[in-house]
Image: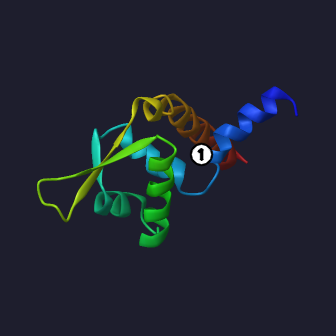
Amino acid sequence: MDQTIGCVKAATDILGDKWTPQLLRFFANERTVRFCQLQDLVGGINPRTLSARLQSLEEKGIITRNLTSSESRCEYQLTELGETLLPIIRDMEQWGRNYAQTQSVR
């Protein structure tokens, strides 16, 4: 397999589903985010799906999960590795804006 293709596959293993890029973009503005905040901000995500995506990101070392002072709540925070994804997320947002503008002109 071409090494470049392998690298793209590694990135899409993390960013290649419908919800993960949308979730990660909220970490660009907030240092820590709670489950209910993410659910409200993304809108339309099933709680099981959100939980599965967060667990996957945690297992891949992209985010950490920390219990708050109230043991029943937790907060999520990007790791150093997760922070390296933010430029990609910002580029995706910019590309999406540009694409939307070209579609509205047609």
Q: Is residue 75 above or below residue 102?
A: below
Give the image location of residue 56, x and y in percent. 51, 54
| Residue found 16% across the figure and 61% down from its top | 71
Give the image location of residue 48, x and y in percent. 46, 71
Please tell me which residue lies in front, 26 or 105: 26
Q: Secondary structure at mark 1?
A: helix
Give the image location of residue 96, x and y in percent. 59, 42
Scheme of image coloration: rainbow
Q: Name the image quarter holding residue 5.
A: top right
Q: Is residue 89 above or below residue 13?
A: above
Q: Amino acid at mark 1?
A: Ile
- Counting other residues with Cα less than 10 Å from the Cα at mark 1, is it few (<14), some (14-19), or many (20 or more)? some
| Residue found 46% across the figure and 40% down from its top | 62
Q: Name the image quarter holding residue 34.
A: bottom left
Q: How many marks?
A: 1
Q: Which residue is mark 1?
A: 14
Horizontal side of 103 relative to 44 (left or right) equals right
| Residue found 59% across the figure and 57% down from its top | 18
Quadrant (top left/top right/bottom left/bottom right) for the N terminus: top right
Please tell me which residue lies in front, 18 or 53: 53
Answer whether residue 46 is visible to the viewer in this image: no
Q: Name the image quarter holding residue 63.
A: top left
Give the image location of residue 54, x and y in percent. 44, 55
Please tell me which residue lies in front, 91 or 47: 47
| Residue found 73% across the figure and 48% down from its top | 106
